[in-house]
Amino acid sequence: MNINYIVLARKWRPKTFSEVIGQQHIITTLCNSLALKRLHHAYLFSGTHGIGKTSIARLLAKCFNCETGITATPCAQCNSCREFEQARFVDFIEIDAASRTKVEDTRDLLDNMQYTPTYGRFKVYLIDEVHMLSRQSFNALLKTIEEPPTHVKLLLVTTDSHKLPITVRSRCMHLHLHVLNTKQIHLQLKYILRQEKIEFDDQALYLLARASNGSMRDALSLTDQAIVMGQGSVLYVTVLQMLGILDDEQALALIEALANGQGEQMMLLLDQAALKGVEWETLLIEILRLLHCIAMVQFLPRYLEDHDIKYTDRLHTLARFLPTTDVQLYYQTILMGRKDLSLAPTRRLGVEMTLLRALAFHPKPKIAQPILSSELTSKLELQLNESKSIILEKSYVDSPDNRILIKKDDAKLSNLTDNLPKSTKELLEARTQLLKQTNKKKDKLIINSILPIDLKRLENPCSTIINDSKTKIQINSEQLGSVEDTKVIPNYSLTIPDDEKKFELSKNIVQEVKQRDPWATEIVKLNLPKLIQQLLLNAWKETAENKIILHLRSHKQYLNTENTCQIIQNALRKKTDNQFLECNIIQDDDLTVLTPMELYHMLYEEKLAIARQSIENDTHIQTLRKFFDADLDQNSVRPL
Ligand SMILES: [Zn+2]
């Protein structure tokens, strides 16, 4: 290789304002002020490293001193311009404040300022990293910054403008440079490599641009490194290796496995990653990036079009399939995991736990259950049930002694929560928040998912099969002529209690329905076939002279068969000593008058709400929630 090789970052430093990437707002300001010859005496350039602050400052100094006159487009021909390019221009003094922080250094500088320029129009002082100067140095400078000799121009450059005294900042023309975006850097890298006649993979450049975090200098340094590694060309594989990142594909596959709740698949992917010698933190960063993409696509469906990102199809699928709250939850979990990575016994372990934690919050965790002997399992279940009932009993005991007891526990537990690491607490809080949001949705979803049960009942209308997640109970429809209606009510009123107490409950509600609506009593007394009883329970009765009109809900119209009216008519006649009654059934979904069935569900809901409220307010349960982040399974609450 040529010994005169100049690194790309230096070689491709902009030589004119038009070559500067981004920063259009600043270039326009400067060009205008140069064209109008309205020059400030002190400029302050701020912004993160490697985005062209010093380059722009140097260009400005060149513009001040071009022999063709003050101009935004220096000639590059005159002595001044050429000396500038060779970094030999005598009246341009570049000072690194980081190495000259003392007040004596500043005094020397100020002494030097009074002499007129040797060759150029202005003496230009560029003070780099100016925030490093000591307080006294700033004070010494202050007067000069406000009113420097007419032949002096001050160019202050800093990455931390907020560290400068406000007195200094207010005396300068402050120009803040923007961080470059990945696309700008990507395009510039492409341009430079084409000019350099170096082969490259486009995706590799994208990765380099992304890894440089908005700094053009970093991007070019990385590119230099990649050229060396790739023996003269920039290859995707070498860049991946160099940056210690996995192929995006693997981070994506991990998210897909997570979304599908496939724990084993996730661990398999981590094994593969380990074999490739992945940098673990980078893996988490990749996952975070992709989650961000997914979240963006969910809000802006065309997001990926503007970003050169691979696997758009798969990302779009994930965006459609994952609930937005899950994406947020995964993001938060992995973010916290990244934060705690340094504390984990090993990095791989940290990553594994983070992903498992995300999986644990998956709506349907598919982590294999530990295999227990059946005896042990039943024992455990027994213990579990006991502890549950103890909690409930305690919460209902009102004696003062017990209250104190509970309060003591409370205090103990809240102490323990305080001791949890902050990040864990934050995570748990975020989770609780998110779950609250998702729960609302869940209720709706469940209604749809249980519809098939309705069909089952059609086959066997005389008894009700209730499909609980654990047990199937058959309730004799004699009770109330079958109680549930899956289309109207959410899941919880369907899962009729599996013990006697709860059986009792339905009875009580039925009793209340009968009290409130005499029509319900009448229906039972008519002794009609069950299907017709069903129909009547789902209709409200309007009585006119010698005529009744049954307002049947539309979703129960299927019960209204050819001679239903006749059967009802006959039964009613029998009841009213053969008084003539005409029966009409009409479809009516107006909910201002409730059918007996609707009344039943309303009462059930009311009792359920009361039960939930009392549990929500229960201090003991609140403590449990706080400590274990136990979220109340709203669907398991039953009224008593
Ligand atoms: Zn010139």
Image (cartoon, helix red, strand yellow):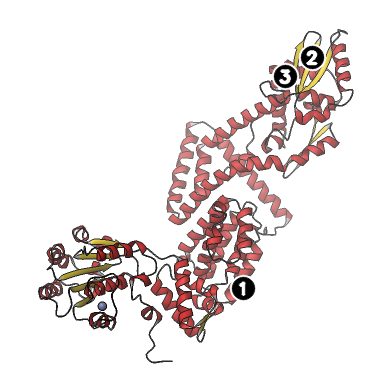
Residue 504 numbered tag: none
Q: Earlier in the sequence, mark 1 or mark 3?
A: 1
| Vertical arrangement, residue 480 with respect to residue 84, above or below | above
Identified at 44% across, 81% down, the residue is 224
Q: Residues within 10 Å of mark 2 (few under 14, many from 20)?
A: some
Q: Which residue is mark 2?
A: 548
Q: Which residue is mark 1?
A: 272
Residue 576 in picture, x, y percent from top left:
84, 9
Viewport quadrant of the N terminus: bottom left
Q: Nearer the viewer, residue 172 or 428?
A: 172
Image quarter of residue 443: top right
Q: Amino acid at mark 3?
A: Lys
- Dots 2 and 1: beta carbons under 8 Å? no
Identified at 53% across, 47% down, the residue is 434
Residue 394 in picture, x, y percent from top left:
55, 37
Residue lying furthest front: 68
Q: Earlier in the sequence, mark 2 or mark 1?
A: 1
Q: Of the residues tagged 3 and 2, which is closer to the observer? A: 2
Q: Of the residues tagged 2 and 1, which is closer to the observer? A: 2
Whole-angstrom CA distance, mark 3 to mark 2, is: 19 Å
Identified at 40% across, 80% down, the residue is 8
Q: Nearer the viewer, residue 536 or 55?
A: 55
Q: Nearer the viewer, residue 217 or 247?
A: 217
Q: Amino acid at mark 2?
A: Ile
